[in-house]
Image (cartoon, grey):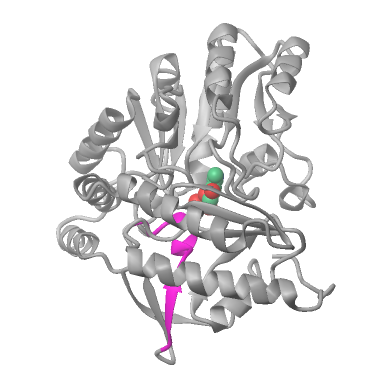
Amino acid sequence: MATYNRLPVTFTRGEGVWLWDTAGKRYLDALSGIAVCGLGHAHPAVQETLCEQAGNLIHTSNLYRIGAQETLGETLITLSGMDKAFFCNSGAEANEAAIKIARLYAHNQGIKDPAILVTESSFHGRTLATLSATGSRKVQAGFEPLVQGFVRVPYDDLEAVETAAANRPNITAILLEPIQGEGGINIPARDYLNRLRELCDRRGWLFMLDEIQTGMGRTGHLFSFQGNGIQPDVVTLAKGLGNGFPIGACLARGEAARVLGPGTHGTTFGGSPLACRVAQTVIETLQHKRLADHASRMGDFLLAGFQQTLGGIEGVAEVRGRGLMIGIELDRPSGDLVPQALEAGLLINVTAERVVRLLPPLIIERAEADLLLRELSLLIKRFLQAPADSTTPES
Ligand SMILES: *Cc1c(COP(=O)(O)O)cnc(C)c1O
């Protein structure tokens, strides 16, 4: 089904930050399959684990104990400071688990119509509950009736949260991204998450972070919340967790970790020996190679570079980022840049219409970052000098 406007290119091989198409042309991948392939393409450790485990055991179902799932759960809770993990197959599913936890948590306290606070311009997935939580009319349009029980406030606005809290006694949780990805690389004030954590403590709300895009080292910490020195009650993961092998996780702590029990949630595929072995290898590689630190250094280099080449020039509204999550906001629709970059051998993305989004593999090296900086700066300058094209399609 035509659920995507695909670019006219097919890749047949990858290695590190590079992809090759059917004609043998090489591309620098500055998107990583949308923040998925943090270790780059065809990583030997991932390949080895996949092949070895596929030859041994792929799936048994959650009716039996799964050693690889228990190991991965231990690894994730140790590294994140959480208590329990539920494994699934995608980001939307991880958020579905979080939403169900929030509702059950409320019902256990006798709240019959609980609400979850969510933010404008957020993205949480494409299932009915997660698109209802998403702050984008484009994602929701045509799928009404939406799932009830979400209250929306502007992102990075503490006062709006206080007002909602005062007016809506049935709110029992807040779900948000530490940095909004699809929404345009929106980075909140330094203490926004810390203040929300305090508010959640005061109100007895669950503080639930969607780290599906920000997690797994991308922002310079294994989990973005670690940069704030705070601990959420629920964290959702997917994208970078399997480096391209589908896996999602919902981690929880304290009371939130205890509400789901036998019969209240489940999955046939989630947490298979194969998926968990791969994710375990991904995490071990991230940790062993200190790739979160590397992402932080490469991100600082790219951010400073783009600020120098593009900052202050006519048509560039802002260059912002944290780690290897970088946004270059222009003053006009910039979807046309994507095919232009493709032509030049660069894979980039434009989100929120005007924000060039870069999510390169965490293993990107200095020479590759240099090339990305040089080529993309040139492309953007040329794009801004060309006469405006009002027919730009929305991405
Ligand atoms: C991609 C994404 C999702 C959805 O993940 P899927 O695996 O596509 O279901 C949810 N939240 C955030 C922040 C994302 O970036």
Nearest the eye: 176 or 188: 188
Measuring 63% from the left and 39% from the top, which residue is drawn there?
Answer: 129
Magenta region, residue range: 25-38
Measuring 69% from the left and 65% from the top, which residue is drawn there?
Answer: 395
In this view, 256 is above or below 95: above
Q: Splitting the image into 4 quarters, where does residue 51 fall?
A: bottom left
Taking the image as shown, residue 375 lies to the left or right of residue 62, namely right
In this view, 211 is above or below 170: below
Taking the image as shown, residue 78 lies to the left or right of residue 368, namely left
Nearest the eye: 259 or 185: 185
Q: Splitting the image into 4 quarters, where does residue 392 fall?
A: bottom right
x and y percent of residue 391 in the render?
A: 83, 75
Nearest the eye: 263 or 358: 358
Taking the image as shown, residue 139 lies to the left or right of residue 82, namely right
Find out whether residue 29 is within the magenta segment: yes
Find out whether residue 66 is within the magenta segment: no
Q: Can residue 247 be seen from the camera position used here?
A: no
